[in-house]
Image (spheres, rainbow, N blue to C red):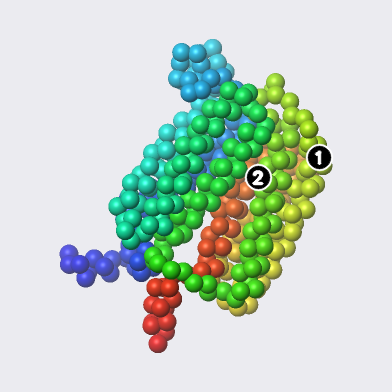
Protein backbone atom coordinates (compact mmCIF):
# COMPACT_ATOMS: atom_id res chain seq x y z
CA UNK A 1 0.00 0.00 0.00
CA UNK A 2 1.39 3.39 -0.94
CA UNK A 3 1.77 6.27 1.46
CA UNK A 4 -0.84 8.24 -0.46
CA UNK A 5 -3.35 5.42 -0.09
CA UNK A 6 -2.52 4.95 3.59
CA UNK A 7 -3.07 8.63 4.31
CA UNK A 8 -6.65 8.28 3.06
CA UNK A 9 -7.54 5.29 5.23
CA UNK A 10 -10.86 5.58 7.13
CA UNK A 11 -9.09 5.35 10.49
CA UNK A 12 -7.28 8.61 9.78
CA UNK A 13 -10.03 10.54 8.03
CA UNK A 14 -11.85 11.04 11.34
CA UNK A 15 -8.83 12.77 12.89
CA UNK A 16 -7.95 16.43 12.62
CA UNK A 17 -4.81 17.27 10.59
CA UNK A 18 -1.81 16.91 12.89
CA UNK A 19 -3.63 14.77 15.46
CA UNK A 20 -1.90 11.79 17.06
CA UNK A 21 -2.34 8.69 14.91
CA UNK A 22 -0.38 6.16 16.98
CA UNK A 23 -2.85 3.41 17.84
CA UNK A 24 -0.88 2.28 20.88
CA UNK A 25 -0.75 5.80 22.28
CA UNK A 26 -4.45 6.32 21.69
CA UNK A 27 -5.29 2.96 23.31
CA UNK A 28 -3.07 3.69 26.33
CA UNK A 29 -4.56 7.17 26.76
CA UNK A 30 -8.11 5.82 26.68
CA UNK A 31 -7.14 3.04 29.10
CA UNK A 32 -5.68 5.63 31.47
CA UNK A 33 -8.89 7.67 31.40
CA UNK A 34 -11.11 4.60 31.86
CA UNK A 35 -9.05 3.19 34.74
CA UNK A 36 -8.92 6.54 36.54
CA UNK A 37 -12.71 6.67 36.31
CA UNK A 38 -13.10 3.03 37.33
CA UNK A 39 -10.94 3.39 40.43
CA UNK A 40 -13.21 6.20 41.65
CA UNK A 41 -16.17 3.83 41.31
CA UNK A 42 -14.38 1.00 43.15
CA UNK A 43 -13.05 3.44 45.74
CA UNK A 44 -16.62 4.55 46.34
CA UNK A 45 -17.66 0.92 46.73
CA UNK A 46 -14.94 0.45 49.34
CA UNK A 47 -16.22 3.36 51.36
CA UNK A 48 -19.94 2.73 50.91
CA UNK A 49 -19.69 -0.93 51.93
CA UNK A 50 -17.57 -0.18 54.98
CA UNK A 51 -14.58 -1.98 53.47
CA UNK A 52 -11.99 0.75 54.04
CA UNK A 53 -10.05 -1.41 56.48
CA UNK A 54 -10.86 -4.71 54.76
CA UNK A 55 -7.12 -4.98 54.19
CA UNK A 56 -5.80 -3.65 57.51
CA UNK A 57 -2.24 -3.20 56.25
CA UNK A 58 -0.45 -1.61 53.30
CA UNK A 59 1.22 -2.51 50.96
CA UNK A 60 0.30 -5.99 52.25
CA UNK A 61 -3.37 -6.85 52.70
CA UNK A 62 -2.90 -8.82 55.93
CA UNK A 63 0.12 -9.59 58.11
CA UNK A 64 2.47 -11.66 55.95
CA UNK A 65 0.06 -11.83 52.98
CA UNK A 66 -0.26 -9.64 49.92
CA UNK A 67 -3.74 -11.02 49.18
CA UNK A 68 -6.79 -11.52 51.46
CA UNK A 69 -6.62 -14.55 53.76
CA UNK A 70 -9.43 -16.89 54.79
CA UNK A 71 -9.67 -15.16 58.17
CA UNK A 72 -10.71 -11.90 56.51
CA UNK A 73 -14.23 -11.07 55.29
CA UNK A 74 -15.73 -10.03 51.95
CA UNK A 75 -14.70 -6.49 52.85
CA UNK A 76 -11.14 -7.61 52.16
CA UNK A 77 -12.04 -8.68 48.63
CA UNK A 78 -13.64 -5.29 47.92
CA UNK A 79 -10.67 -3.36 49.28
CA UNK A 80 -8.15 -5.65 47.58
CA UNK A 81 -10.03 -5.33 44.29
CA UNK A 82 -9.72 -1.56 44.50
CA UNK A 83 -6.02 -1.84 45.24
CA UNK A 84 -5.50 -4.21 42.32
CA UNK A 85 -6.61 -1.55 39.84
CA UNK A 86 -3.64 0.59 40.89
CA UNK A 87 -1.30 -1.77 39.04
CA UNK A 88 -2.91 -1.48 35.58
CA UNK A 89 -3.42 2.23 36.26
CA UNK A 90 0.31 2.76 36.79
CA UNK A 91 1.13 0.65 33.72
CA UNK A 92 -1.28 2.63 31.54
CA UNK A 93 0.15 5.92 32.81
CA UNK A 94 3.69 4.72 32.18
CA UNK A 95 2.82 3.58 28.65
CA UNK A 96 1.34 6.98 27.86
CA UNK A 97 4.57 8.62 29.03
CA UNK A 98 6.68 6.25 26.92
CA UNK A 99 4.63 6.73 23.76
CA UNK A 100 4.42 10.49 24.37
CA UNK A 101 8.21 10.58 24.73
CA UNK A 102 8.52 9.25 21.19
CA UNK A 103 6.63 12.25 19.79
CA UNK A 104 7.90 14.81 22.28
CA UNK A 105 9.57 16.89 19.56
CA UNK A 106 6.21 17.47 17.89
CA UNK A 107 3.91 17.25 20.90
CA UNK A 108 5.72 18.51 23.96
CA UNK A 109 2.35 19.46 25.43
CA UNK A 110 1.25 15.83 25.49
CA UNK A 111 4.53 14.61 26.95
CA UNK A 112 4.41 17.17 29.78
CA UNK A 113 0.79 16.32 30.53
CA UNK A 114 1.54 12.58 30.58
CA UNK A 115 4.34 13.12 33.14
CA UNK A 116 2.01 15.07 35.42
CA UNK A 117 -0.61 12.33 35.18
CA UNK A 118 1.88 9.57 36.01
CA UNK A 119 3.20 11.57 38.97
CA UNK A 120 -0.29 12.03 40.39
CA UNK A 121 -1.10 8.33 39.91
CA UNK A 122 2.02 7.44 41.94
CA UNK A 123 1.01 10.00 44.58
CA UNK A 124 -2.45 8.46 44.79
CA UNK A 125 -1.01 5.02 45.48
CA UNK A 126 1.05 6.42 48.34
CA UNK A 127 -1.84 8.46 49.78
CA UNK A 128 -4.02 5.34 49.68
CA UNK A 129 -1.50 3.56 51.88
CA UNK A 130 -1.28 6.48 54.30
CA UNK A 131 -5.09 6.49 54.58
CA UNK A 132 -4.99 2.87 55.77
CA UNK A 133 -2.21 3.68 58.24
CA UNK A 134 -4.23 6.67 59.52
CA UNK A 135 -7.41 4.54 59.88
CA UNK A 136 -9.41 6.35 57.20
CA UNK A 137 -8.72 9.93 58.21
CA UNK A 138 -11.61 11.95 56.73
CA UNK A 139 -9.42 14.77 55.42
CA UNK A 140 -7.07 12.36 53.67
CA UNK A 141 -9.99 10.46 52.14
CA UNK A 142 -11.39 13.74 50.80
CA UNK A 143 -7.98 14.71 49.41
CA UNK A 144 -7.69 11.26 47.81
CA UNK A 145 -10.99 11.76 45.99
CA UNK A 146 -10.16 15.28 44.83
CA UNK A 147 -6.85 14.12 43.33
CA UNK A 148 -8.73 11.34 41.54
CA UNK A 149 -11.09 13.93 40.04
CA UNK A 150 -8.12 16.01 38.92
CA UNK A 151 -6.63 12.91 37.30
CA UNK A 152 -9.82 12.22 35.38
CA UNK A 153 -9.88 15.82 34.16
CA UNK A 154 -6.23 15.65 33.09
CA UNK A 155 -6.68 12.36 31.24
CA UNK A 156 -9.77 13.79 29.54
CA UNK A 157 -7.72 16.85 28.58
CA UNK A 158 -5.03 14.56 27.15
CA UNK A 159 -7.62 12.80 24.98
CA UNK A 160 -8.99 16.12 23.77
CA UNK A 161 -5.57 17.56 22.91
CA UNK A 162 -4.48 14.28 21.32
CA UNK A 163 -7.19 14.72 18.70
CA UNK A 164 -6.03 18.21 17.79
CA UNK A 165 -3.10 19.59 15.86
CA UNK A 166 -0.02 20.82 17.67
CA UNK A 167 1.05 24.43 18.01
CA UNK A 168 -0.47 27.68 19.14
CA UNK A 169 -4.18 27.78 19.89
CA UNK A 170 -6.52 30.73 19.45
CA UNK A 171 -9.94 31.50 20.85
CA UNK A 172 -12.86 30.70 18.55
CA UNK A 173 -15.62 32.08 20.77
CA UNK A 174 -16.59 35.63 21.77
CA UNK A 175 -14.65 36.89 24.77
CA UNK A 176 -17.77 37.29 26.98
CA UNK A 177 -18.70 33.66 26.27
CA UNK A 178 -15.23 32.52 27.28
CA UNK A 179 -15.44 34.48 30.52
CA UNK A 180 -18.89 33.05 31.26
CA UNK A 181 -17.58 29.52 30.66
CA UNK A 182 -14.71 30.00 33.08
CA UNK A 183 -17.08 31.43 35.69
CA UNK A 184 -19.26 28.35 35.24
CA UNK A 185 -16.19 26.17 35.73
CA UNK A 186 -15.48 27.94 39.02
CA UNK A 187 -19.07 27.39 40.17
CA UNK A 188 -18.73 23.72 39.22
CA UNK A 189 -15.49 23.43 41.22
CA UNK A 190 -17.16 24.96 44.28
CA UNK A 191 -20.04 22.49 43.90
CA UNK A 192 -17.64 19.55 43.83
CA UNK A 193 -15.68 20.89 46.80
CA UNK A 194 -18.82 21.20 48.94
CA UNK A 195 -19.87 17.76 47.75
CA UNK A 196 -16.59 16.28 48.98
CA UNK A 197 -17.02 17.98 52.36
CA UNK A 198 -20.61 16.75 52.57
CA UNK A 199 -19.61 13.17 51.85
CA UNK A 200 -16.68 13.35 54.26
CA UNK A 201 -19.02 14.40 57.07
CA UNK A 202 -21.73 11.90 56.15
CA UNK A 203 -22.49 8.40 57.46
CA UNK A 204 -20.46 6.44 54.88
CA UNK A 205 -17.08 6.62 56.57
CA UNK A 206 -15.59 3.49 55.06
CA UNK A 207 -15.72 1.37 58.19
CA UNK A 208 -18.42 0.71 60.79
CA UNK A 209 -16.07 1.64 63.64
CA UNK A 210 -15.16 5.05 62.19
CA UNK A 211 -17.40 7.94 63.17
CA UNK A 212 -17.36 11.34 61.53
CA UNK A 213 -17.78 14.54 63.51
CA UNK A 214 -17.26 18.26 63.10
CA UNK A 215 -19.25 19.43 60.07
CA UNK A 216 -23.00 18.82 60.10
CA UNK A 217 -23.80 16.62 57.09
CA UNK A 218 -27.42 17.79 56.79
CA UNK A 219 -26.40 21.43 56.72
CA UNK A 220 -23.63 20.69 54.22
CA UNK A 221 -26.05 18.89 51.92
CA UNK A 222 -28.05 22.12 51.60
CA UNK A 223 -24.89 24.20 51.11
CA UNK A 224 -23.76 21.72 48.45
CA UNK A 225 -27.04 22.08 46.55
CA UNK A 226 -26.87 25.87 46.18
CA UNK A 227 -23.83 26.06 43.88
CA UNK A 228 -25.15 22.90 42.17
CA UNK A 229 -28.29 24.71 41.04
CA UNK A 230 -26.16 27.73 40.10
CA UNK A 231 -23.98 25.46 37.94
CA UNK A 232 -27.12 24.15 36.25
CA UNK A 233 -28.33 27.68 35.50
CA UNK A 234 -24.92 28.64 34.11
CA UNK A 235 -24.83 25.55 31.91
CA UNK A 236 -28.31 26.20 30.50
CA UNK A 237 -27.28 29.76 29.67
CA UNK A 238 -24.11 28.54 27.94
CA UNK A 239 -26.03 25.97 25.89
CA UNK A 240 -28.56 28.55 24.71
CA UNK A 241 -25.81 31.04 23.91
CA UNK A 242 -23.66 28.48 22.07
CA UNK A 243 -26.67 27.20 20.10
CA UNK A 244 -27.69 30.70 19.04
CA UNK A 245 -24.17 31.55 17.86
CA UNK A 246 -23.27 28.01 16.67
CA UNK A 247 -20.13 27.96 18.80
CA UNK A 248 -17.61 25.13 18.85
CA UNK A 249 -18.20 23.96 22.49
CA UNK A 250 -21.94 23.36 21.89
CA UNK A 251 -21.90 19.52 21.61
CA UNK A 252 -19.93 19.15 24.82
CA UNK A 253 -22.05 21.73 26.64
CA UNK A 254 -25.19 19.79 25.68
CA UNK A 255 -23.55 16.63 27.03
CA UNK A 256 -22.58 18.49 30.19
CA UNK A 257 -26.15 19.68 30.67
CA UNK A 258 -27.51 16.16 30.30
CA UNK A 259 -25.06 14.67 32.81
CA UNK A 260 -25.59 17.55 35.22
CA UNK A 261 -29.38 17.14 35.18
CA UNK A 262 -29.04 13.44 36.01
CA UNK A 263 -26.49 14.30 38.69
CA UNK A 264 -28.85 16.75 40.37
CA UNK A 265 -31.78 14.29 40.22
CA UNK A 266 -29.64 11.60 41.87
CA UNK A 267 -28.49 14.13 44.47
CA UNK A 268 -32.06 15.11 45.35
CA UNK A 269 -33.07 11.44 45.54
CA UNK A 270 -30.23 10.44 47.84
CA UNK A 271 -30.84 13.41 50.14
CA UNK A 272 -34.56 12.57 50.48
CA UNK A 273 -33.99 8.82 50.91
CA UNK A 274 -31.40 9.03 53.66
CA UNK A 275 -28.25 8.63 51.52
CA UNK A 276 -28.63 5.04 50.22
CA UNK A 277 -25.13 3.72 49.41
CA UNK A 278 -25.84 2.87 45.77
CA UNK A 279 -27.21 6.33 45.01
CA UNK A 280 -24.22 7.95 46.71
CA UNK A 281 -21.90 5.82 44.57
CA UNK A 282 -23.70 6.82 41.38
CA UNK A 283 -23.49 10.46 42.48
CA UNK A 284 -19.71 10.14 42.91
CA UNK A 285 -19.20 8.63 39.46
CA UNK A 286 -21.46 11.23 37.83
CA UNK A 287 -19.37 13.95 39.48
CA UNK A 288 -16.37 12.42 37.73
CA UNK A 289 -18.07 12.46 34.34
CA UNK A 290 -19.37 15.99 34.91
CA UNK A 291 -15.94 17.44 35.66
CA UNK A 292 -14.37 15.57 32.73
CA UNK A 293 -17.01 16.89 30.33
CA UNK A 294 -16.57 20.41 31.67
CA UNK A 295 -12.83 20.12 31.06
CA UNK A 296 -13.31 19.21 27.39
CA UNK A 297 -15.91 21.96 26.95
CA UNK A 298 -13.42 24.52 28.24
CA UNK A 299 -10.71 23.22 25.90
CA UNK A 300 -13.12 23.67 22.98
CA UNK A 301 -13.05 27.43 23.57
CA UNK A 302 -9.80 27.45 21.60
CA UNK A 303 -8.62 25.76 18.44
CA UNK A 304 -5.15 25.14 17.01
CA UNK A 305 -4.08 27.81 14.52
CA UNK A 306 -3.25 25.09 11.99
CA UNK A 307 -6.84 23.81 12.07
CA UNK A 308 -8.27 27.33 11.77
CA UNK A 309 -6.08 28.05 8.74
CA UNK A 310 -7.01 24.70 7.16
CA UNK A 311 -10.70 25.37 7.68
CA UNK A 312 -10.35 28.86 6.19
CA UNK A 313 -8.51 27.52 3.14
CA UNK A 314 -11.19 24.87 2.61
CA UNK A 315 -13.96 27.47 2.83
CA UNK A 316 -12.31 29.49 0.11
Residue 252: x and y in percent read: 56, 63
State the residue in front, 109 or 270: 109
Asked if the residue under mark 1 is in contact with the one under mark 2, i.e. CB atoms within 8 Å, the reply is: no
State the residue in front, 185 or 288: 185
Foreground: disc 2 or disc 1: 1
Q: Is residue 23 left or right of residue 233?
A: left
Q: Specify few, some or many for label 2: CA neighbours under 10 Å numbering under 14, 14-19, or 20 or more.
A: many
Residue located 48% across and 50% down the image: 155
Residue located 64% across and 59% down the image: 185
Marks 2/1: CA–CA distance: 17 Å
Q: Which residue is mark 1?
A: 218
Residue located 57% across and 35% down the image: 43
Q: Which residue is mark 2?
A: 283
Residue 255: x and y in percent read: 58, 61
Residue 18: x and y in percent read: 35, 66
Query: From where the camera sits, is residue 16 visible?
Result: yes
The quarter holding residue 65 reads top left
Of the numbered discs 2 and 1, the one sitting upstream in the chain is 1
Task: Say which element carries label 2.
Answer: helix
Query: From where the camera sits, is residue 257 visible?
Result: no
Q: Is residue 124 left or right of residue 259?
A: left
Residue 168: x and y in percent read: 43, 68
Q: Specify few, some or many for label 1: CA neighbours under 10 Å numbering under 14, 14-19, or 20 or more.
A: few
Amino acid sequence: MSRATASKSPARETLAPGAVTSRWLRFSAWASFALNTLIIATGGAVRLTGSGLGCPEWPLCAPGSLVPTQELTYHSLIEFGNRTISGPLLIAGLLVVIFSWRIRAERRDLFSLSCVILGLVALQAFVGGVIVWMHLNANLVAFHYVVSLVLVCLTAAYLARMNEARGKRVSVVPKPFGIATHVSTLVMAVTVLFGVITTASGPHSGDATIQRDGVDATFMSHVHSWPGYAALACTVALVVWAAAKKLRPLPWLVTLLAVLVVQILVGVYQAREGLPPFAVGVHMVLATLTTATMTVAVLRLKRPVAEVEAATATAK
